[in-house]
Image (cartoon, rainbow, N blue to C red):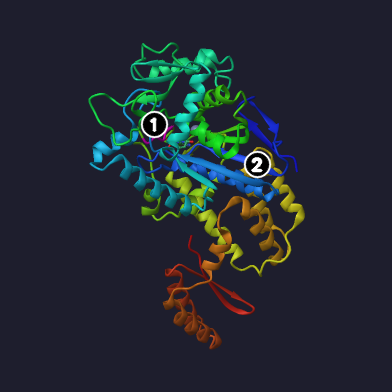
Amino acid sequence: MKIHLYNSLNRKKEEFVPIKTGKVGLYSCGPTVYDHPHIGNLGAYIVWDVLKRFLISQGYRVKHVMNITDVGHLTSDADEGEDKLELASRRSGRSAWQIAEYFLKVFRNNINNLNIVEPDRFIRATETIKEQVHFIKILSDKGFLYKINDGLYFDTSKLPSYGRLANLQAVDLQAGARVEENKEKKNPSDFAVWKFSPEDKKRDMEWDSPWGVGFPGWHLECSVMSRMELGDTFDIHTGGEDHLSLHHPNEMAQSEAATGQLQANYWLHNAFIKYQGGKMSKSAGSFFTLENIKEKSYAPMAYRFLVLQNHYRSPLNFTWESLSAAQAGLKNIVREIAFYDKPKKASKDVLSEFYQAMADDLATPRALSFLQEVINSNLKSGDKLATIFKMDKVLGLDLENLRDKSQELPSEAHTLLKDRELARKNKDWTESDRLREKLTALGIDIYDTPKGQKAIWVRL
Ligand code: AMP
Ligand code: ZN
């Protein structure tokens, strides 16, 4: 099946052709671990998880690499301000290392809750300092760098292709608008590859280098790790749309300068998940975490379902009502499949339509409509279940597990069910209804079938 993906590099949907037949090198820019990830960040990783699962469903062997930014990401996103981890450390009284350790654990936990498959290689920026220093040497030898007071900078005017991903004007604006411009830079779009530690202060995270004690610039780790793990050019690079104007052009520029090759062939960007029409952002403090969702008794899987109801290139305005509707919708699916026979034969026709929707730039809302179509169809229930489980290998809603879980009842239900069976045998309908109400209060659904009563307890 031909797969088409929207490639930000050429601003159009393109047929996906991997470098090596049957294999895909996939790189996703990872989180900065200075705080809880918000559900916007996590939404992005749900999207890339579905991309990966879909490629695997089409027979590709995918190597997925993700960086963990635990140093060098400054509060301005450009090269000014304080390191986000050092700042969090100062505020909390814990070391930057402890902060990174803690929030990396939180991130892993969160993606696990959302049924996101962990990348094959998950690498912290601080684990590759040696390689990053080596990479800087290559850039320096090739004449792309210059030194100023606070660090070693990449001269973007030396690379004619710079800004190919965004338009250069936007990058210029960005550098100027966010922070007081660093007057020593040769061009506003130049960026640091190595920042020097402040003279009057010892940082938690700093290393010696041929240019002085300091730490790597934020963009460098992705160029270095992707090259280490996936080679000079790999297939797909992903990130949020915020990366289009700064982080990705800079990453791409460093890689191209060092290797002479295009870093990745397909550049995919997810639109933002918003709240009340505004940006959900960690630094602005306007965000929800997965813990906030759980505190309000919503399941992480309901959030995953909500994200998939939206196409990844359209912004999603998060509301509690929409999450509530998604939770109810997912419960309905589980309630439905709880009664199906064991999985038998998947329907090739519906599956092919489902895959076709996914192959059209990951049209998850359309793909989900085929799941509902299977439920409404007159296929045999075992065939329905086999088809749905195949779809779920891509969607990752964990339906097999949720279905199994729905069959386990709480202990107090067993006696109530036995009593109700007896009441029904004795045609004592009042008692039977009374017991049904008690069971319903426990969250149990009961169906009276020709084979007797059947009870399920749907939990996400
Ligand atoms: P960060 O931890 O800030 O480096 O962000 C991790 C990932 O989440 C990056 O790929 C961002 O582009 C992405 N991202 C940040 N905010 C949002 C949002 N509100 N909605 C969707 N993706 C986001
Ligand atoms: Zn990156």
Say whether disc 1 or disc 2 marks the residue closer to the N-terminus. 2
Q: Nearer the viewer, residue 95 or 374?
A: 95
Q: Residue furthest front?
A: 210
The answer to whether residue 261 is above or below residue 52 is: above
Disc 1 Cβ-to-ligand 1 distance below 8 Å: yes
Asked whether 197 or 249 is in front, the reply is 197
Which residue is found at the position 69% from the left and 66% from the top? Answer: 381
What span is in magenta?
Answer: 278-282
Our reading of the magenta stretch's main secondary structure is: loop
* Label disc, if present, on residue 405 of the rendered structure: none
Q: Is residue 402 left or right of residue 186?
A: right
Residue occupying image coordinates x 72% and y 60%: 346
Furthest-bottom residue in this view: 426
x, y (%) of residue 419?
47, 84
**Residue 56, how many percent across, how many down?**
65, 49
User: What residue is pinned by disc 2?
Assistant: 24
Q: Amino acid at mark 1?
A: His
The answer to whether residue 192 is left or right of residue 259 is left
Determine whether the beta carbon of the residue marked 2 sits less than 8 angstroms from the nearest atom of ligand 2.
Answer: no
Q: Residue at horizontal 65%, vertical 44%?
A: 366
| Residue topped by disc 1 | 73
In the rendered image, residue 374, in percent from the top left (x then y), is placed at 68, 56
- Which of the two residues, 2 or 219, is positioned nearer the viewer here? 219
